[in-house]
Amino acid sequence: MLHHRTAPRFCQPLAPTKLLLRLKTRRREKQHCQVVYEDRGLQTAPMHVYARTPRYLYYQAEIELSRPWECRYFFRQEVEGAGPVYFFAGIDGQGVRPFTYRWTAADIFTVPDWIYDAVSYQIFPDRFYNGNPANDPPGTRPWGEAPTRENFFGGDLEGIQAKIPYLKFLGVNALWLNPIFASPSNHRYNTSDYLAVDPVLGDTATLCRLVESLHANGMHLILDGVFNHTGTEFFAFKDVVARGASSPYKDWYYFHGFPVKSEPRPNYTCWWDIPSLPKLKASNPEVRNYLLHVATYWLREAGTDGWRLDVPNEIEPAFWREFRRQVKETNPQAYIVGEIWHDARFWLQNHLFDGVMNYLFRDLVLDYFARRRFPISTLDYLLGLIRLRYPEAANFALLNLVGSHDTARVITAFQEGLAGLPGHTGSYAEAITHLRPALILQFTYPGAPLIYYGDEVGMTGGPDPDCRRTMPWDPRAWNQDLLNFYRRLIALRQRLLPLRRGYFQPLFTDDGAEVYAYARRLAGEKVIVILNAGDLTQSINLAVGEMEIAGGTTWQDGLSGRCFEVQGGKISLPLEANAGAILVSC
Ligand code: ARE
Ligand code: CA
């Protein structure tokens, strides 16, 4: 069985002269697939496995043409012990007909170039570092006290600025800040003024200075855009509260009557029935223009590098289309990432966002590494399904996270998961041990890894608000081993281009041993990653020849520094429990 269609799952233009092609075949060992295409005669390109389901393999190749906008091609498959099979679009009076794919500039989906190289870091501003005690709000609590829904700790933009050396030491190069505009709450999702930095965080000048310093250090900054709802202190909402139906802003929200009241139940639509978050009517052109002004204002005024969009699935797609147009017009390298917790294919295939917060990745990581809900081959399969759903460019622009300000912290989530497994206790140490292979996956997977501030030093915490504790700055409070592990993974990702820009190629899984091997390949270069998620040491035999990854004869593990020779077409290496290897040919 061979299957191909000129549809996004199988065919994606990457540039005027670049095309990504996929072929689906029955899953079996020892087969090779190629694409044969017309480009000054017939050319042949090898295809590599890209994703695997229990029954099928998806092969992929990227081809470069000398002429733009059109490609004619067919496929060739060789199964060991049989002659080659050719796969064409059809057959007619003239003979076999190749597939023909034509595209225009509008079909090409690109994402900002810098996001391919990003290792990102999320900061909840009130809790990262207090760089200026003079701007602390009244009642600021001592650093280190337990967070509540209401309390403040005095973290601010100068604090982030002061910790740029730490961020560099860690190796991250992109920051996402939770909301920073004027708001009465510590999380600031109920905005009072979109055009002012909250005075307890700083002001426009502090923000501009921060962006300048980040840029000077090769880092990017994205802000949190809360465009679905405002706070009740927002000027338009306040005006309607004061003037009722005669307010010029009465159509900025969904009011069900006047005067406006929030008790016992609000008579206006709000986000998840929370009265402090009245929902804006984005279909009203005045509202739309206001929000679009905000979106482009900060890109221009402060030079920020994009937006993380809060609950974008609750606003109509037409708004986001115009949003994207204006944002990209203002800064073509601005990055737009939507907060979508589930399948985001609608938003990405329609090219509305560059990427999404990849909560599906988090779900899979926890379900496998912490809860063992399925075997490792299923992890391979489910990760592949996500890759197949999204435009390939978007796969590189996802924020791959394992926790955020809206979830329990990853270590705590691992503890809870492991506690439910036979033979495990759910201790902190056990969580760290099992987290290691998961982190190797996160930092060697396509898409930008996103670190939630403090995870790297071993912070714990249950769901909101406990996951928003203050960052400890005394290195004695840090888990140094974990921090070093993060630093090593980040450094490897920054050193090895295929880890950032290479295509994913699953190699093998072994459910019994709990081992997963895959490659990241970029033109001739490749990196092989092997995870041992089990509790036993395994000896791995990697048949490099068969997997079409023959490189040099020596491979080095970037994590341990050990070198391995290829002998008889195989690399043999021992792999400790809950560990991994990142092999580079040398
Ligand atoms: C807090 C408490 C609530 C309490 C509320 C009212 O956490 O339990 O009911 O206060 O007092 C922000 C703050 C929150 C605050 C909330 C309301 O950060 O601390 O809540 O405002 O004041 C869903 C949405 C997703 C949303 C999460 C939180 O789909 O968009 O819920 N995330 C964004 C931000 C939040 C922010 C808001 C939205 C509101 O990132 O920080 O909250 O602007 C799943 C579902 C998801 C669901 C997720 C978590 O798996 O699939 O849809 O996300 O669980 O619940
Ligand atoms: Ca402060």
Image: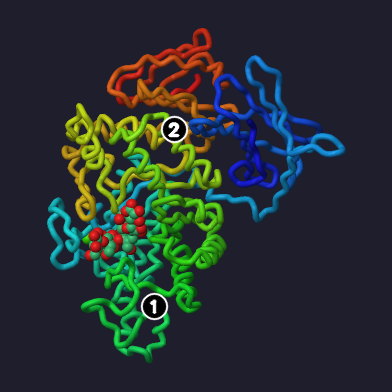
Residue at the bottom extreme?
Answer: 246
Give the residue pinned by disc 2. Answer: 380
Determine whether 578 is above or below 245 in the image. Answer: above
Q: Would residue 523 be seen by someone viewing this image from the given angle? A: yes
Task: Please state which amino acid type lies under the numbered disc 1.
Answer: Tyr
Q: Position of residue 382 (x, y in %)?
A: 44, 38
Disc with the residue nearer the chain's start (2 vs 1): 1
From what the image shows, is residue 365 above or below residue 232? above
> Circle 1: is it few (<14), some (14-19), or many (20+) Cα within 10 Å?
many
Residue placed under numbered mark 1 in the picture? 253
| Point 43% across, 13% down: residue | 572
Question: Percent position (x, y) of residue 306?
Answer: 45, 57
Tag 2's secondary structure? helix
Report the residue at 38% width, 29% height from top.
376
Mark 2 belongs to which amino acid?
Asp
Question: At which x and y percent is residue 409?
Answer: 25, 45
Q: Nearer the viewer, residue 553 or 55?
A: 55
Q: Quadrant of ligand 2?
A: bottom left
Instruction: Determine the secondary structure under disc 1.
Output: loop
Label placed on residue 493: none
Work out which residue is located at the far right of the displayed protein and give it. Answer: 94
Q: Is residue 438 shown above or below 343?
A: above
